[in-house]
Image: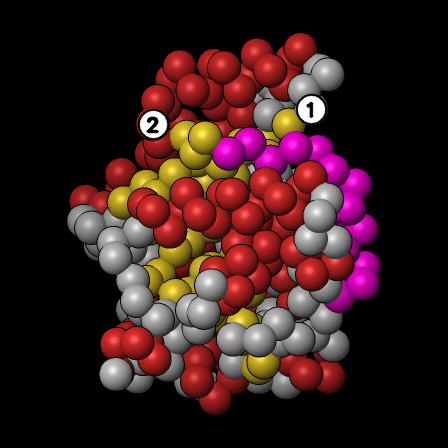
Amino acid sequence: MIRIAVANQKGGVGKTTTAINLATALAATGMKVLLLDLDPQGNASTGLGVAQAARLRNSYDVLLGEASIVDAAVPSRVPRLDLLAATQDLSGAEVELVGYDRRTHRLADALDAVPDGRWDVCLMDCPPSLGLLTVNALVSAKQLLVPLQCEFFALEGLSQLLQTVERIRSRFNPELAILGVALTMFDRRNSLSRQVAEDVRACLGTAVFDTVVPRNVRLSEAPSHGLPALIYDLKCSGSEAYVRLARELIARLPRITPTTAEAA
Ligand code: ADP
Ligand code: MG
């Protein structure tokens, strides 16, 4: 199972929107996808239409070792896309885990226990901080995808994230690779937006995906219907961008074949 953390310690940059819609696009190609909601706000869970009542077992239980991922994951309305939901409880986990063994490796251990072939790819939707939840995601992931909002302080926040990645590589997870940086909420009529996109490309080069996700109101409406934008309105500019981004992402991944094909 390929493990991809979707992280950026800034809030409101498009992590959850990116995680939900890429997960949906990957599932549409035939992969079995697991989306891990690691944000106590549970936006990915809500955005996929998973009600509170269906979050009885969730990412908090998994991190505390009280449930396995296989037992706690629930199906979403999207075929082949399952969710490990989040609840408010998760906000206590950062503090509670401090007293636990292997507190930085709780998620990695839980993912290691998932039987081969259960899912092809796992996307982790991280909270807006570099605390223990995000550290658990980065320790367990092989790949990092960074959504970056096209606004003035975008690069500043990124250097802090990259320092954390360096620390995690040297201490825990030398294989952690940057899969790419995805520019989000791009407004082509706004010269600042264009300037930021140019600066980010000048600074990070090919790490930046060619696809730029535009600011698109359909992307922000979809979660209130409990649907990924890709299903709510496949033809809107935002959905089209996420389909292209998913293609680029697949091209960058180490070769993956759906488990069904692997087993054959
Ligand atoms: P994060 O998970 O980083 O906090 P979200 O994905 O939740 O960010 O996005 C923050 C807000 O912006 C949400 O209300 C979301 O619906 C909206 N949003 C995200 N991406 C776009 C976009 N490309 N165009 C318009 N609204 C967006
Ligand atoms: Mg979010």
Residue 213 among magenta residues: yes
Secondary structure beneath label 1: loop
Residue 119, relative to residue 53: is it above or below? above
Q: Nearer the viewer, residue 32 or 193?
A: 32
Return the residue at label 2: 206
Kindly identify the residue that appears in the image at 39 percent across and 65 percent down. 121
Give the residues in magenta: 211-226
Tag 2: residue type?
Thr
Q: Quadrant of residue 162?
A: top left
Q: Position of residue 226 (x, y in %)?
A: 75, 66
**Where the N terminus falls, by quadrant?**
bottom left
Left or right, 245 with respect to 152, comes to left
Q: Which mark is residue 187?
A: 1
* Total labels drawn: 2
Query: Which of marks 2 and 1 precedes in the sequence?
Result: 1
Within-10-Å neighbours for mark 2: few <14, some 14–19, many 20+: few
